[in-house]
Image (cartoon, helix red, strand yellow):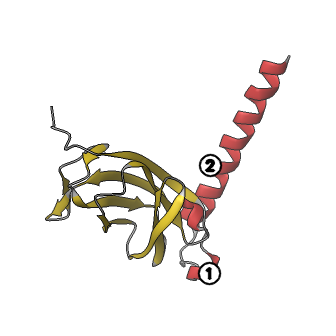
Amino acid sequence: MRVQSVIVFVLVMVAMSAMTFAQVEDSTKAAPAEEVSASALTAEVQLCTAVEERVPTGAGDSFGSDIGQLCLWSKISGAVDTTFIRHVWYFQGEEKATVELPVRSPSFRTWSRKTILPEWIGEWEVKVLDADGNLLSTTPFTIFKEKVEKQ
């Protein structure tokens, strides 16, 4: 009985999402930015050592403490109007930086860079938030004392 309730709930949620999407698609006039729900955004992210020609290079999830800096590359999809996202960089649960980045089209690539000091050894994460503070993505990574060789 409980499984049936869960299935019904999921089906109702899918149907409601489809109706909302259909309403947005049927609209011939774009809503002002303050009326657009940024929660419709999706983020594809890649932690990397550099971005060359808008493409991430040197991807990984663990780096040596001599790395110097890292980038979080993001491809944001679903924007109806100009908006922004935030990359929030955390070291061992403490916020180290927040970078606000514009999103100017329905499919937009952007990135932020963070200097990594050699003594910041341990667990990190970068959260990608939309303009309303909704979480779009979390990317954990580790900084090791010694340089980690790529395989």
Mark 1 near mark 2, Cβ–Cβ under 8 Å?
no
67 sits left or right of 9 in the view: left
Percent position (x, y) of residue 43?
43, 55
To which residue does mark 1 refer? 34
Q: Quadrant of the C terminus?
A: top left
Q: Nearer the viewer, residue 2 or 19?
A: 2
Residue bearing mark 2: 18
Seen in the picture, residue 121 relative to 36 is either above or below; the reply is above
Question: Where is 101 relative to 66, above or below?
Answer: below
Compared across the picture, whether 142 is left or right of 34 comes to: left
Q: Identify which residue is drawn at 73% across, 26% down.
A: 7
Amino acid type of the residue tagged 1 in the rendering: Glu
- Of helix, strand and loop, which one carries label 2? helix
Kind of residue at badge 2 = Ala
Q: Pointer 1: residues within 10 angstroms few (<14), some, or many (20+)?
A: few
Tell me which residue sits at (37%, 57%) in the image: 120
Horizontally, residue 61 falls left or right of residue 36, namely left
How many residues crowd around disc 2 within 10 Å: few (fewer than 14), some, or many (20 or more)? few
